[in-house]
Structures are given as C-alpha cells and as structure tokens.
Amino acid sequence: DGGITQSPKYLFRKEGQNVTLSCEQNLNHDAMYWYRQDPGQGLRLIYYSQIVNDFQKGDIAEGYSVSREKKESFPLTVTSAQKNPTAFYLCASTPSNRDREDQPQHFGDGTRLSIL
Amino acid sequence: AQSVTQLGSHVSVSEGALVLLRCNYSSSVPPYLFWYVQYPNQGLQLLLKYTSAATLVKGINGFEAEFKKSETSFHLTKPSAHMSDAAEYFCAVSPIYSSASKIIFGSGTRLSIRP
C-alpha cells in the first residue's frame, strides 16, 4: 500500500537539543509539507517542498529546518531555537509540483514531540 | 485575507441522530473547500472536496456537504451518526488561483457520539 510513513510516533527532546522527525512517502508525489498541530488549533504550515533540492518557508518556519535530497524523503529538524516545540507534527504530500490549489493533501500519522 | 471558521469546537449527538458540523469561509471568490477527519493520534483523511463541479458533494462514510455561496458556508452532514464517527473534523479552504501550500485549516470540531 502506498502512503506516508512518519517516525518515530513519539519523541522526547531535552533542552538545547536538536531532533529530527522522519517523513517518507512511496506515493511518487512531488510536493511535501510539514504542519504543526496544537490542541484546539488548526494546522499551521512549517515548510513545504515542491521539488527535490528546493523548499520554502511556511507561516511558522522559525526554529525549524528541512532538507529534500530525495523525492520520497522530507525530514524536519526541530532546533534548540524553537522554544515551544511540544506539538503534534504532521507530514503531507500532493501529487503535482505544479502546486495546484484543488489537490487534497495526503497525510502521515504524525509524530508527537514532547519536552523532557 | 482568506479565513475559515468552524462553529463549535465540540459537538455531541446521539447514535442514529443527524450530524451537522458547521464551516464558514471568507473569500470574495468561491474557493476550493475540503473536509478532513482525524482519529486520535492519526493524520488527517480526506472526507470530501468541493471544486465547483456540484454544490452538493458526497464523501466517504456517508458524509456529504453543501456549498452555499450566498451564506459562504460548507456545512458537513450525515443523516445517522454511528459510534465510529467519533473523531475531529477539519474544514479547509484553498484560495482559487493560488497553490496547495496556501490551504487554510479551521480549528477543528470534535464530534462525540452518545450511545
């Protein structure tokens, strides 16, 4: 079955530590996205990538970094500069790098990050 | 600026009763609209989408939504609630002539089903 795999499911970060969340897709989708979800709020876009070796900042990119070295992989690093990292992180993808606005997004099952 | 409002952060209905989850958007031009469902500790799953082909859109699991331009609404309904419908539901708007990265999600409505 094709889909998006996020790992780990739960992650704990110590103060001053960088952590990396994995996102892998076998849907052959061009575009990939990272969202942050906080209780009682909608999803907020952190970063997105429409093509390999290229990515753009979303609405809340500060304290985060990404890379897109392979089409199927889009890891997110939560750096120590992100002072409030506790949240549920969702990775998503869409088929086309034309970034069409009518394309629904396919989501992984998320990673829950907490502070120790 | 585009926005989407979901009225009611929590809705509770009895099993077998009508489900109505409200979504209003603000836009001068009708956007593309989506409803997603999220079960605990999972990602979002597409229920249905409106892309101007028809105002009444049927989705999975017996859900449907009606686009009403005059009311700028896209409410989600299901005639008879089932226990398995308990989840969080998100309405999302994607501005026309923009891009998938510009999609805006509502704050969500948690649906509870009473036995």
Image (cartoon, grey):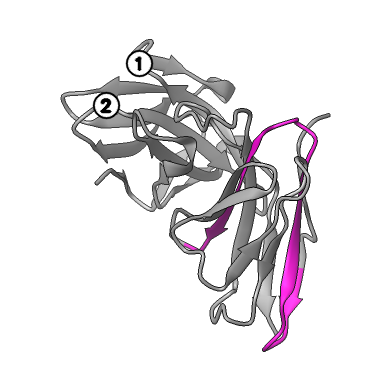
Residue with the mark numbered 2: B30
Left or right: where A44 falls relative to B95: right
Residue at the location (83% across, 29% down)? A1
Chain of the residue that carries numbered disc 2 in the rendered image: B
Residue with the mark numbered 1: B52
As helix, strand or loop, the secondary structure at mark 2 comes to loop
Which residue is more in the foreground, B88 or B20?
B88
Q: Which quadrant of the view contains residue A77?
A: bottom right
**Looking at the picture, which amino acid does disc 1 mark?**
Ser
Q: Where are the magenta residues, as a range? A: A11-39
Mark number, residue A109:
none
Is residue B97 depicted above or below A111 in this figure? above
Residue at the location (36% across, 11% down)? B54
**Looking at the picture, which amino acid does disc 2 mark?**
Pro
Residue at the location (63% across, 65% down)? A65
Which residue is more in the foreground, B59 or A93?
A93
Residue A50 inside the magenta-drawn segment = no
Q: x, y (%) of residue B36?
A: 52, 37
Q: x, y (%) of residue A47?
A: 56, 55
